[in-house]
Image (cartoon, rainbow, N blue to C red):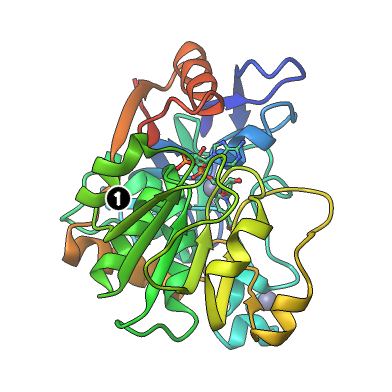
Amino acid sequence: MPSFTVFKGTESGAPKKSTTTKPDQLTGDNVLIKVTASGLCGTDLHYKNADMVLGHEGVGVVESTGPDCKVLKKGDRVGWGYNHNTCGHCQQCLSGSDIHCPERKMYGEADLDQGSFASHAVWREAFVFKTPDELSDEDAAPLQCGGATVFSALHDFPLNPTDNVGIMGVGGLGHLAIQFAAKMGCRVTVLSGSDSKKDEAMRLGAHEFIATKGKKELKISRPLNRLLVTTSAQPNWEQIVPIMAPGSKIFPLSVAFGNFEMPYFPIVVQGLTIQGSVVASRHVHQKMLQFAALHQIKPVIQTFPMTEEGIQDAMTKLENGEVHFRAVLKAQ
Ligand SMILES: NC(=O)c1ccc[n+]([C@@H]2O[C@H](COP(=O)([O-])OP(=O)(O)OC[C@H]3O[C@@H](n4cnc5c(N)ncnc54)[C@H](OP(=O)(O)O)[C@@H]3O)[C@@H](O)[C@H]2O)c1
Ligand SMILES: [Zn+2]
Ligand SMILES: [Zn+2]
């Protein structure tokens, strides 16, 4: 030990059980975590064909700690997300923007031998977050990426409680974004493909709901000061630009490839900002967990067993838009 079970992507896309072995003794500030639950994020679908361990919304319990650990001890409830390490001495690390560290070690690029679809994982204590008592493991899991991503887009750039915040896409990220923005005191306008998620979006804190599919022009009662785009594909930007307030900010959070094509002139004359954003720096991640615990922000989850069949089932449902609203895999 530690030798543990992991679930990897494969050429066919069917998750495959495998084993990862780490050195016998934990070194430095590494901790061995027994995974209890993991969220399934839209981004995992992009890696289902990669030869790597899947999952980056991990939650569990510390089983043992390395010699340099200072904060965590055996039995602590913890979670981790998309980023596993940074250099600690560049301008980004020093200024609290460590998610942009040029040497960051993110999911999909580094540490491919372990992830949160697993029985265990070994991570640096410095990149692991204590789970607040108010949150169950299943509720804390989707916060580690989905929650961190939308909270960061709301938190890191000045936001007024009087702002009208648009959330486009009511999925894993979107349904958390509605709750965070509402609890920050903002008016929340939800943009969703159809009317089917209206009741739930209003229950989660939305003030206005707009169905977008097939509409040439969107009717909105107040222009948006900020828009978080959390759809799984790039949206129709021509539909969106006219409903943005002058000087407002658009956060395209969707993972998509190819070029960004947008009506050009309105950006210039309306003074719009297009703001990229990726998950969250550590201090923001930590604040997000505290904010969620204080305001009882919880994901709406559907649980699946952490087995090859369970992961496959959850992934198929996510691809088909059938997950309500975040799939969580539970350790067996
Ligand atoms: N920037 C980051 O750091 C970051 C972090 C995590 C995830 N992501 C990305 O964020 C996106 C959302 O992730 P998620 O886990 O929330 O996914 P999700 O649960 O699948 O939610 C995506 C939502 O997008 C809408 N949608 C589905 N198919 C669509 C299509 N073909 N075109 C347009 N909209 C569609 C649906 O909402 P409606 O039914 O309401 O329309 C769906 O619920 C993914 O692209 C993911 O890779 C980015
Ligand atoms: Zn994610
Ligand atoms: Zn750095």
Q: Quadrant of the C terminus?
A: top left
Q: Which residue is drawn at 34% across and 61% down?
A: 72
* Amino acid at the residue labelled 1: Lys
Q: Name the residue under label 1.
A: 74
Give the side of residue 314 with respect to residue 42, left or right.
left
Residue 272: image quadrant is bottom right
Residue lying at 42% horizontally and 45% vertically, measured from the top left: 170
For the residue pair 115 and 261, the one nearer the viewer reads as 261
Give the answer, above or below, for where 38 lies relative to 81: above
Residue 125 image offset from top left, x and y in percent:
46, 61
Q: Is residue 114 left or right of residue 125?
A: right
Residue 197 position (above or below residue 277): above
SS at mark 1 in the image: loop
- The image position of residue 46, as x and y in percent, is 68, 36
Displayed-image quarter of ligand 1: top right
130 or 262, which is in the foreground? 262
Return the residue found at the far top. 309
- At 54% from the left and 19% from the top, the residue drawn is 316
